[in-house]
Image (tube, rainbow, N blue to C red):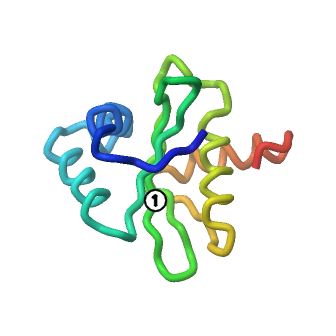
Amino acid sequence: MLIRYKKSFKKIAMGLLSYMPQEKELKTLKETMECYESNDDWQLYLWKVDEDIVGVVGVVIEQKKVEILHIAVNPSYRDEGIGTKMIAEVKKTHPDLNVVPGEAISRFYEKCTKEAGKGSRL
């Protein structure tokens, strides 16, 4: 289930975002979190399985598109289709906007959309 980020989830969100290669350095990670917390166009969502938060997806909304900038899943929950489900939920959350991948996640996005084409996840 996709839930909207709240400051009470900051440490969890930062931990998940740190799985993104470009977010390895603490300074960069803190700057990214500041963008999500201070810009209305930057939205961060968390993926919850039962009571555990296991994924994060961050988007920026620009005119008629939603660009997915960040997406990460806890390694213990990988290969379960969670990334694909998060992308699908972002599309449902913004039905009137074109959802596109950012440069950092484009390969992962393509993989998820190909997998979804084989099933009915997206």
Position of residue 50 measured from the top left corner of the image (x, y, whole percent):
58, 24
> Which residue is rendered at x = 28% and y = 45% of the image?
7
Q: Secondary structure at mark 1?
A: strand
Q: Tell me: 27 left or right of 36.
A: left
Position of residue 116 measured from the top left corner of the image (x, y, whole percent):
78, 44
> Which residue is rendered at x = 38% and y = 34% of the image?
16
User: Which is more toward the observer, 38 or 109?
Assistant: 38
> Which residue is rendered at x = 17% and y = 39% of the image?
26
Position of residue 40 measured from the top left corner of the image (x, y, whole percent):
35, 69
Mark 1: give few (<14), some (14-19) or many (20+) Cα within 10 Å.
many
Q: Does residue 33 lie above or below 51 as drawn?
A: below
> Which residue is rendered at x = 35% and y = 47% of the image?
6
User: Which is more toward the observer, 18 or 51?
Assistant: 51
User: Which is more toward the observer, 12 or 59?
Assistant: 12
Q: Amino acid at mark 1?
A: Val
Q: Residue lying farthest left? A: 27
Which residue carries the number 1 mark?
59
Task: Tell me which corner region of the image, top left, top right, bottom left or bottom right, holds residue 27.
Answer: top left
Task: Tell me which corner region of the image, top left, top right, bottom left or bottom right, holds residue 101.
Answer: bottom right
User: Which is more toward the observer, 62 or 10?
Assistant: 10
